[in-house]
């Protein structure tokens, strides 16, 4: 997955739309509108805002930037699609996600709710109440609940460390949604198999396109 120039990114979005790779009408419409307005070229921040979305407690709007140290919150029925650097996110309703100032130690903390993410190159640390997840240039879907964390490593590699874990991190590798898991931290903590849920490949195609890339499962 290589980075592209703004012109290459626009051409990539055109190809994705023309090839029918975005089967969701809403997402295809979003791409078509952006192409018509030339609004995806090197864009950062909020690409799409639906319903009650806030950044650091202030109502978010399309084009609103999201910076390290800030928190994005979505109300019930809301949704936000945004880009930070070479990373793109689809944050669903009733979710709170905070971005730290250090990528390797605390890039993103999922306080509650659902977020689908694609990341550029470089090591990053993602945290929930139940685990620290180290990733590099990958994609994942996280659902943070009070009693457990759902993680689907959509593709790429990750290292999972539980709060009470004293041994080496648990390493995962996935080509295409290979091993979703539930993570709990009660007692010594546990990682249990799960089913893929609440996200799909069209969303990953859109997010990667916003970052100027294609997901690796598209040959």
Image (cartoon, grey):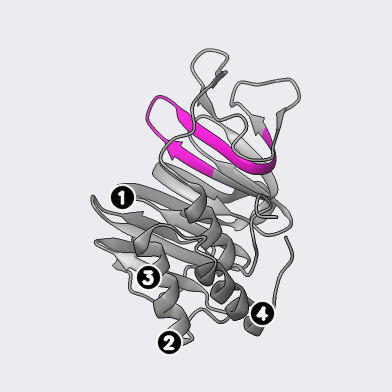
Residue to which mark 3 is pinned: 29
Residue to which mark 4 is pinned: 8
Which of disc 1 and disc 3 is earlier in sequence? 3
The magenta segment is 141-159
Q: Residue 111's spot in the image, x, y percent? A: 42, 43
CA gap, disc 3 and disc 2 = 12 Å
Dot 2: within a 10 Å radius of its alpha carbon, few (fewer than 14), some, or many (20 or more) residues? few
CA gap, disc 4 and disc 1 = 32 Å
Residue to which mark 1 is pinned: 93
Q: Nearer the viewer, mark 3 or mark 2?
A: 3
Dot 3: within a 10 Å radius of its alpha carbon, few (fewer than 14), some, or many (20 or more) residues? few
Helix, strand or loop status at disc 3: helix
Whether residue 155 appears in magenta in the rendering, the answer is yes
Q: Nearer the viewer, mark 3 or mark 1?
A: 3
Residue to which mark 2 is pinned: 37
Give the quarter of the image for residue 154: top right
162 up-or-down from 187: above or below: below
Q: State whether the magenta stretch is mostly helix, strand or loop.
A: strand
Q: Which residue, as the protein is rendered here, is positioned at the far front?
A: 19
């Amino acid at each position: 997955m290589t980075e592209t120039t703004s012109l290459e990114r626009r051409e990539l979005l055109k190809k994705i739309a023309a090839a029918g790779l975005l089967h969701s009408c809403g997402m295809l419409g979003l791409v078509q509108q952006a192409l018509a307005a030339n609004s995806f070229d090197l864009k950062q921040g909020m690409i799409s805002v639906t319903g009650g979305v806030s950044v650091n407690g202030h109502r978010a709007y399309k084009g609103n930037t999201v910076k390290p140290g800030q928190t994005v919150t979505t109300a019930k029925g809301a949704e936000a699609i945004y880009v930070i650097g070479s990373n793109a996110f689809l944050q669903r309703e009733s979710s709170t996600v905070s971005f730290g100032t250090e990528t390797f130690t605390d890039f993103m903390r999922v306080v509650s709710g659902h977020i689908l993410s694609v990341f550029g190159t470089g090591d990053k640390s993602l945290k929930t109440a139940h685990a620290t997840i180290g990733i590099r240039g990958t994609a994942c879907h996280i659902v943070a609940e009070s009693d457990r964390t759902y993680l689907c490593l959509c593709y790429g590699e990750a290292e999972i460390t539980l709060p009470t874990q004293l041994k080496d991190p648990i390493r995962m590798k996935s080509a295409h949604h290979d091993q979703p898991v539930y993570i709990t931290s009660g007692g010594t903590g546990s990682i249990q198999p799960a089913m893929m849920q609440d996200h799909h490949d069209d969303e990953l195609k859109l997010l990667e396109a916003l970052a100027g890339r294609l997901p690796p499962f598209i040959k």
